[in-house]
Image (spheres, coloured by chain):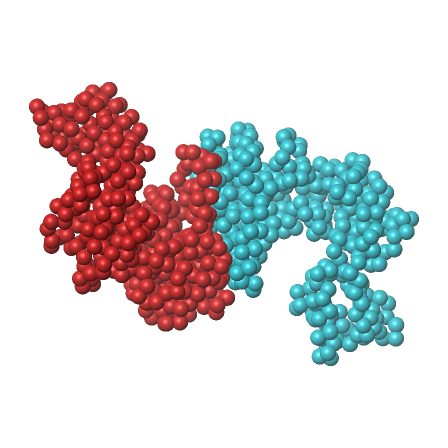
Chain colours: A cyan, B red
Amino acid sequence: MPLLVMKFGGTSVANLDRIRRAAKRVGVEVAKGYDVIVIVSAMSGKTNELVGWVGETSPLYDAREYDAVVSSGENVTAGLMALTLQEMDVPARSWQGWQVPLKTNSAHSQARIEDIGTDNINAKFGEGMKVAVVAGFQGVSPEGRITTLGRGGSDTTAVAFAAAFGAERCDIYTDVDGVYTTDPRICEKARKLDKIAFEEMLELASLGAKVLQTRSVELAMRYKVKLRVLSSFEEQSDEAGTLVCDEEEIMESNVVNGVAYSRDEAKLTCLSVADRPGIAATIFGCLSDAGVNVDMIVQNISEDGRTDMTFSCPTDQVQRAEVALSAYKEKGELNYGELVADTGVAKISVVGIGMRSQSGVAAKMFKVLSDEGINIKVITTSEIKISVLVDRKYMELAVQALHDAFELDKAS
Amino acid sequence: MPLLVMKFGGTSVANLDRIRRAAKRVGVEVAKGYDVIVIVSAMSGKTNELVGWVGETSPLYDAREYDAVVSSGENVTAGLMALTLQEMDVPARSWQGWQVPLKTNSAHSQARIEDIGTDNINAKFGEGMKVAVVAGFQGVSPEGRITTLGRGGSDTTAVAFAAAFGAERCDIYTDVDGVYTTDPRICEKARKLDKIAFEEMLELASLGAKVLQTRSVELAMRYKVKLRVLSSFEEQSDEAGTLVCDEEEIMESNVVNGVAYSRDEAKLTCLSVADRPGIAATIFGCLSDAGVNVDMIVQNISEDGRTDMTFSCPTDQVQRAEVALSAYKEKGELNYGELVADTGVAKISVVGIGMRSQSGVAAKMFKVLSDEGINIKVITTSEIKISVLVDRKYMELAVQALHDAFELDKAS
């Protein structure tokens, strides 16, 4: 029997009516002859409520208890979804992580999936069950305790099930109708993509396009799981939404497929650092130990044995970075003149697998920004992405100008 | 290490403040040198919310999914309680039913406990854990599915743990400060009992005194678990509340220790039933199949081979009884003249283990009611209890008069 995985996020199961609507979508696929594994999130708001209670009870909480509490929201939705399907005469039952079992490591609150047992669920498919409703976001540790996979973990659960069960496709139902060339809220010409390559989606996901959790895209790429993002609020055809797939399946692609942005970035510069081997390791080891998520790194040309080291991080981590670096300076482990922080910047990126085979994308990007009078503060590039830091006040203008210049409103 | 079981009901863990207050009570016992197993209910209102969702989703729900959904409330409280204790530097962790494991049969939504594994929890006590917080009301079936024990099941969980772990005592924290001679809301002279025998508590519990679930008292009696009922809202001494214990531990007892009532009773009479062997089996087999909870049964003296059969049941089951009996009558399996229902009655009972050794209690009860002009409609008796049905309008008067006559306001 061909098998589909369908994942419904929190807004798609926010109340009993929406659960019914989602169940009808599942029923359509069952009627086509599919066995279905449904992955559900908690009803929207529930996880935040539980997280709030844990934080209020214990600011530095035991992550094992956090997981025990926070995972309960998905259990409720899974049971209700199974009941809704049964009411529609679709044979269904719910599964919690430990019942599957979905085995993880012991890194509570951000556990990694190690194995998914397929025997229990396949046995029930063999007995006539048509739909297994699985509580997303949770698993069980080697010690037999409940673990959770981190925020957005239900996407990862869905892709992992699709890989383990060899699903034909993994459909992610959410509150948007697909992946866009950029955020429609700041660029009205934004266009929904019919297909996007895993690598591009990965860059867009990690750049702040919140449609899919980064890890789920990584996992889909590794196991070649066809991933579709679509809206649970619209009538669906088989071609709805955006298919995230191997680049071979995309016949022709624009050079640039998306413009992403990240609003709350800060740029920090260590002035006049001694330019000797190991200095970068010292600085970024110090920041890593302090839990600062460093993104872009640029080192200026050395003069007189001194250099400037510039990096970016989220604005809310600036203070942590300052404290950590000055502690190292006081201990004499690091020698620099001054630490300058600019918390008024944003990151703009253009992404596209076509860049690999076409040059001139960077030059074009810089010219577009220059023509708009936007100064570029930092540049980094990867094989399929070019990112720049600019003053935050220019963020929307930069996105719109680049979207126009690369003609993202037109399909390839 | 001596061990205590402490159970906190829904109102005692209704919010984070109350959980903190309950945790402080636990901390007091830990400071005295006890290892503690805490059994928690869901925060008050949560279980009703979940039950409501299940009923709305699927009126004739699959009890296995009902259990998966409804058990989640206790998991939340267990985790939050463990975190609260940890914040107080008391080593604690939470346990869900399947983790203990608390094994039950497969009678979903009203499962019976079959076994409680003590190895896992004892191993953690051995490692320095001082408090095991266990989610009440739930277990796991032989098929590995989550079961629940029926409403009030957390009391039963607590007693079962006390039996399995050989606890010194099982303290049930609730929103009343003990067991009373009768309901203080309808008799202001009602007095809190310091001690009550298991048998008496069992009669009072099944008669509608909602302090303890009947099954928990049965279990405590069978395994000789000392049970204490006390308030979580008052400062507690070691003598607080009411101790439910073996009658040998009660030195001197009143002949009558409690007056109980049950408001929503109905009296039904099958008139002119053929008086032949097997007729009672037919009638009550029919009612049992229809799910009618028959309580009192009285058969009148037979005349001319015909008799009247009177029984009582909750008022909301009268219609079900009528439908079931007339169906039997139409099929010719039962022959009776008419079915007369009186839905305006209440049951009043006096309970006391002293009745075993002292006669005249029934006579006194009937005289007290007669003196107040209250007509008795049905009488049944057991070794330690006398129950009567009277018109509901006399219920409060009857309770007060009996409470006075047996001097229940005075300690023995």
Q: Residue at x 36, y 69 (%)?
A: B34
Task: Please say whether residue B248 is visible from this viewpoint.
Answer: no
A82 relative to A270, above or below: above
Q: Position of residue A305 (x, y in %)?
A: 85, 75
- Total numbered labels: 0
Left/right placement of residue A114 relative to residue B172 reads right
Comparing B295 with A86, the one in front is B295
B271 relative to B101, above or below: above
Task: Please say whether residue B397 is visible from this viewpoint.
Answer: yes
Q: Position of residue A314 (x, y in %)?
A: 72, 59
Comparing A323 with B187, the one in front is B187
Q: Residue at x 45, y 62 (%)?
A: B21
Quarter of the picture containing the C terminus of chain A is top right
Left/right placement of residue B169 relative to residue A115 reads left
B130 relative to A388, above or below: below
Q: Residue at x 83, y 48 (%)?
A: A398
Comparing B170 with A292, the one in front is B170
Q: Residue at x 29, y 26 (%)?
A: B323
B381 relative to A114, above or below: above
Q: Position of residue B158 (x, y in %)?
A: 34, 56
Q: Position of residue B244 (x, y in %)?
A: 26, 58
Comparing A230 with B153, the one in front is B153
Left/right placement of residue A97 relative to residue B283 reads right
